[in-house]
Image (tube, rainbow, N blue to C red):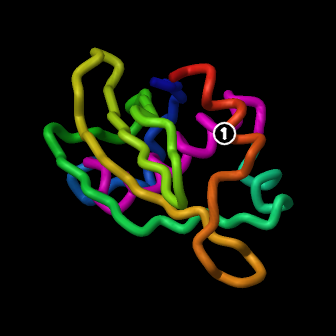
Amino acid sequence: MFESTTQIRVRYAETDQMSVVYYGNYAQYFEVGRVESIRQLGLSYKQIEEFGVIMPVVEMNIKFLRSAEYDDLLTVKTSVKELPTNHKIEFHQEVYNEANKLLTVGRIVLYFIDAATKAKTNMPALLKEKLEKFF
């Protein structure tokens, strides 16, 4: 299993009138976690796109357990529990506050898509090589 963590500070603009993080912002927090997890592998989304592969989100499930508030330092834990063998990759993500309380959990599925043809394709070889050592 591959795991990574990244931290995000809640900005004022991400909260509602109660100083609580607006639920729609968790999709962005999860994206930051995914992008940074790939960077921690030694790649970037930009490089993957340069290989001619795009990665749209096709499914997202989120469960909200506790609220995050303005100025909280959040830790986004991102994991890949199974090595992808076809056109999709599944990320499991958790958001914790500074007291290490679990706030939110999510499961996000992305497809590997050929940028030119828009057809499903397999995971880029270099990404597979980077991930394989964790399985």
Rendered-image quadrant of the N terminus? top left
User: What residue does disc 1 label?
Assistant: 128
Residue at the image point whose x is 32% and y is 27% from the top: 96
Residue at the image point whose x is 49% and y is 57% from the top: 88
Look at the image and say whether residue 39 sits in the magenta stretch: yes
Q: What range of the chain is rendered magenta?
A: 20-43
Can residue 69 be seen at all in this image of the molecule?
A: yes
Q: Main secondary structure of the magenta part?
A: helix
Residue type at mark 1 is: Lys
**102 sits to left or right of 110:** left
**8 sits to left or right of 95:** right
Q: Residue furthest bottom?
A: 117
Q: Looking at the image, which is closer to me, 87 or 101?
A: 87
**67 sits to left or right of 50:** left
Q: Looking at the image, which is closer to me, 106 or 27?
A: 106
Give the percent coordinates (x, y) of residue 84: 51, 45
Residue at the image point whose x is 32% and y is 26% from the top: 97
Give the percent coordinates (x, y) of residue 109: 41, 57
